[in-house]
């Protein structure tokens, strides 16, 4: 699974928005390996209401096929069978003090 063009956005807490340097490019994700998208160590930044965005609002609301922020690639050698498939992504916030 690939997460591309990751950014933090806010409509209400611009003064406490961490810089773009706190956002880490994580692509592709590795199965069963914990990976961090945002690591903020900036004093006075990172509290309030924020959204972690993948790609852009323009691409998300544009014509079909333009949004590429999150994608799943299945290798050609993988045998797919008819049925239901399920995946889980766990989000957490950790106190790094």
Image: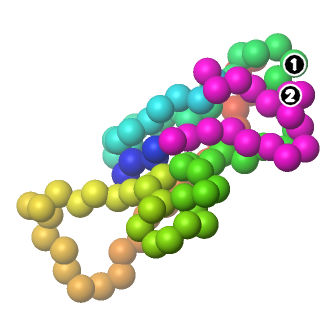
Question: Any mark on residue 2, and which?
Answer: none
* 11 displayed left or right of 27: right
Q: Residue at x 48, y 52 (%)?
A: 69
Where's residue 83, x and y in %? 30, 85
Q: Residues within 10 Å of mark 2 (few under 14, many from 20)?
A: some
Residue 9 covered by magenta stretch: yes
Dots 1, 2 in contact, CB < 8 A: yes
Judging depth in this view, the residue of 73 and 95 nearest the camera is: 73
In this picture, is 92 found above or below 87? above
Where's residue 78, x and y in %? 14, 64
Q: Secondary structure at mark 2?
A: helix
Magenta region: which residues?
Answer: 5-21
Where's residue 51, x and y in %? 72, 47
Question: Disc 1 to disc 2, how far (Cα)?
Answer: 6 Å
In this picture, is 77 found above or below 37? below
Q: Residue at x 54, y 49 (%)?
A: 55
Residue 20 covered by magenta stretch: yes
* 21 displayed left or right of 12: left
Q: Residue at x 71, y 16 (%)?
A: 41
* 93 displayed left or right of 78: right
Q: Residue at x 85, y 46 (%)?
A: 11
In this picture, is 20 found above or below 73? above
Q: Residue furthest bottom?
A: 82
Question: Any mark on residue 44, and which?
Answer: 1
The quadrant where residue 27 appears:
top left
Where's residue 93, x and y in %? 70, 38
Judging depth in this view, the residue of 83 and 26 nearest the camera is: 26
Question: Any mark on residue 16, and which?
Answer: 2
């Amino acid at each position: 699974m690939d997460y591309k063009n990751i950014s933090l956005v806010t409509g209400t807490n611009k003064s406490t928005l961490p810089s773009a340097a706190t956002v880490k490019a994580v692509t592709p994700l590795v199965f069963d390996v914990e990976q961090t998208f945002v690591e903020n160590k900036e004093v006075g930044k990172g509290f309030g209401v924020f959204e972690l965005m993948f790609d852009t609002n323009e691409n998300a609301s544009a014509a079909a096929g333009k949004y590429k922020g999150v994608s799943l690639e299945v290798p050609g050698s993988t045998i797919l069978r008819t049925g239901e498939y399920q995946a889980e992504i766990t989000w957490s916030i950790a106190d790094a003090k």
